[in-house]
Image (tube, grey):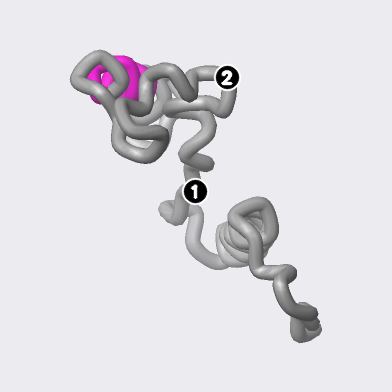
């Protein structure tokens, strides 16, 4: 397996998400029960107003995130079906 070479300050959230996506996809070949969900699918960058202090979700944001997670997880082809 090739090693990822990073230079400072290259370890950004975008890099971490890309690596998690890559690793999960590679490992799904031997573990079909492994799933990865990028958090931006639950609360996207365009919903920053739902972060009370710019970091922590509001109660409404938690409701949106929960509904989106349930829709993803329990969809006909979702990981919990």
Residue 5, quarter of picture: bottom right
Question: Could you tell me if residue 14 is visible in this image?
Answer: yes
Residue 39 in the image: state x and y as whole percent. Answer: 47, 39
In the image, 63 versus 52, the foreground residue is 52
As drawn, the residue found furthest toward the front would be 53
**Which quadrant, please, contains the C terminus?**
top left
Instruction: Determine whether, in the image, residue 41 is placed left or right of residue 2.
Output: left
Q: Characterize the local packing of mark 2: few (<14), some (14-19) or many (20 or more) Cα atoms within 10 angstroms.
A: few
Does residue 52 appear to the left or right of 6 in the view shown? left
Secondary structure of residue under mark 2: helix
Residue pointed to by mark 2: 46
57 to 75, vertically: above or below: below
> What segment is highlighted magenta in the picture?
62-69
- CA neighbours of label 1 inside 10 A, class few (<14), some (14 to 19), many (20+): some
Residue 53 percent across, percent down from the top left: 33, 33
**What residue is at 24 percent from the left and 17 percent from the top?**
63
The residue at which mark 1 appears reads as 36
Placement of the N terminus among the 4 image quadrants: bottom right
x and y percentages locating residue 43 in the rendered image: 45, 26
Residue 1 is labelled as: none
**11 falls in the magenta region:** no
What residue is drawn where x is 79% and y is 80%?
7
Identify which residue, 45 or 49, lies in the foreground.
Answer: 49
Q: Residue at x 66, y 68 (%)?
A: 11
Secondary structure beneath disc 1? loop
Q: Decide whether the magenta segment is chiefly helix, strand or loop.
A: helix
Tell me which label, 1 or 2, sits earlier in the chain: 1
């Amino acid at each position: 397996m090739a090693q990822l070479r990073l230079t400072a300050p290259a370890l950004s959230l975008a890099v971490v998400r890309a690596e998690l996506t890559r690793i999960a996809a590679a490992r799904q070949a031997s573990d079909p029960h492994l799933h990865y969900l990028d958090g931006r699918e639950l609360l996207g960058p365009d919903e920053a107003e739902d972060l009370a202090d710019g970091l922590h979700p509001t109660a409404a944001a938690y409701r949106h995130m929960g509904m989106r997670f349930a829709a993803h997880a329990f969809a006909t082809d979702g990981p919990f079906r």
